Amino acid sequence: GDGFKSNILRLKKICNIERLRSGKEGMAIEWTGWITDIDLKKRLKEELLCDRSIWTATMLETLARCPFSFYMKDVLKLIKFEETDVEIDHLTAGSITHRILERFYKTARERGMLPLSGIEIESLLLNETISFVFKEIEDIDFTGSKGLWEIKKHQIISMLKRFYKDEIENHDRDFMPEYFEIEFGRNKNVPLLDIVLPDDVFVHIKGKIDRVDRCDKALRVIDYKMGSLPGKDEIGRIY
């Protein structure tokens, strides 16, 4: 009937819009989300690429993954409405994991246990560090529902065990973990990272480096990732 025909036509229109949105021919059309107003583009450039503008790695990743989210959060400065939750969020879980690894490696270095070799005392130290940080979190921070917190702890422990196993099996023993959770661009000790774009435009970046390993002639930067890694196409758009 007419209702079915109308739905089919609407579906075809939606499919065509999505095809244009994902194809190169739709990149410069306003309803695909691309800004075409010359004056607005000039204002945004002045706001985002001026000398006082400071970017973070998270901002770059957001811009690559979803420009609209970047526009909402980092240009319009809209605040996301936070619903009351019964468990810790992904960012908090990541922060806990970072705290455990930082404490574990610093203690291992102080005790002369680096590079890691898989001996029992290392596993004991890791378990001890995990228990200490979990207790610290439970004493001072929100952990939500007790049952969900227990599940989250098991997930974090499982991930850390896999990480430890991978470190032993794949770590280049010429490199020694040297620095942990290094902030740059946030104080005078470590300056901003400046990236030069075409037309001599500078992008100033601040952030935190999870870990730096050192060998005789090189440094290696380690970035811990709990979530998915950026795809090659996303990296290509930004970095």
Image (cartoon, helix red, strand yellow):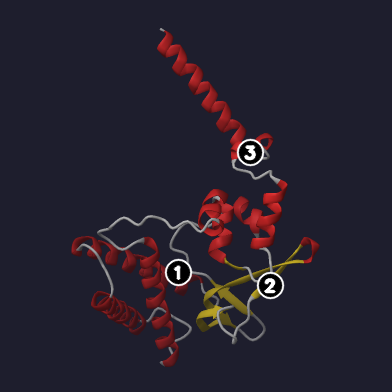
Residue 19 lies left or right of residue 170; in this view the side is right
Looking at the image, which residue sits at the far top? 1
Q: Earlier in the sequence, mark 2 or mark 1?
A: 1
Relative image position of residue 23 (x, y in whole percent): 64, 36
For the residue pair 85 and 235, the one nearer the viewer reads as 85
Relative image position of residue 26 (x, y in whole percent): 65, 35
Secondary structure under tag 3 reads helix
Q: Earlier in the sequence, mark 3 or mark 1?
A: 3
User: Which residue is tagged 2?
Assistant: 194
Disc 2 to disc 1, how far (Cα)?
33 Å
Secondary structure under tag 1 reads helix
Question: Mark 2: few, some, or many residues within 10 Å (few <14, many ≥20)?
Answer: some
- Which callout, 2 or 1, points to the residue nearer the camera? 2
Residue 61 lies left or right of residue 158; in this view the side is right
Inspect the image, locate mark 3, and give the three-letter code of the amino acid beneath it: Glu
Label annotation for residue 166: 1
Quarter of the N terminus within the rendering: top left
User: Which residue is tagged 3?
Assistant: 30
Relative image position of residue 164 (x, y in whole percent): 41, 73
Disc 3 to disc 1, how far (Cα)?
47 Å
Q: Residue at x 59, y 54 (%)?
A: 64
For the residue pair 149 and 211, the one nearer the viewer reads as 149
Inspect the image, locate mark 2, and give the three-letter code of the amino acid beneath it: Asp
Secondary structure under tag 2 reads strand
Q: Find residue 50 and report its image quarter.
A: bottom right
Relative image position of residue 206 (x, y in whole percent): 58, 73
Disc 3 to disc 2, how far (Cα)?
32 Å
Inspect the image, locate mark 1, and give the three-letter code of the amino acid beneath it: Asp
Question: Mark 3: few, some, or many residues within 10 Å (few <14, many ≥20)?
Answer: few
Q: Is residue 175 visible?
A: no
Q: Residue at x 37, y 77 (%)?
A: 100
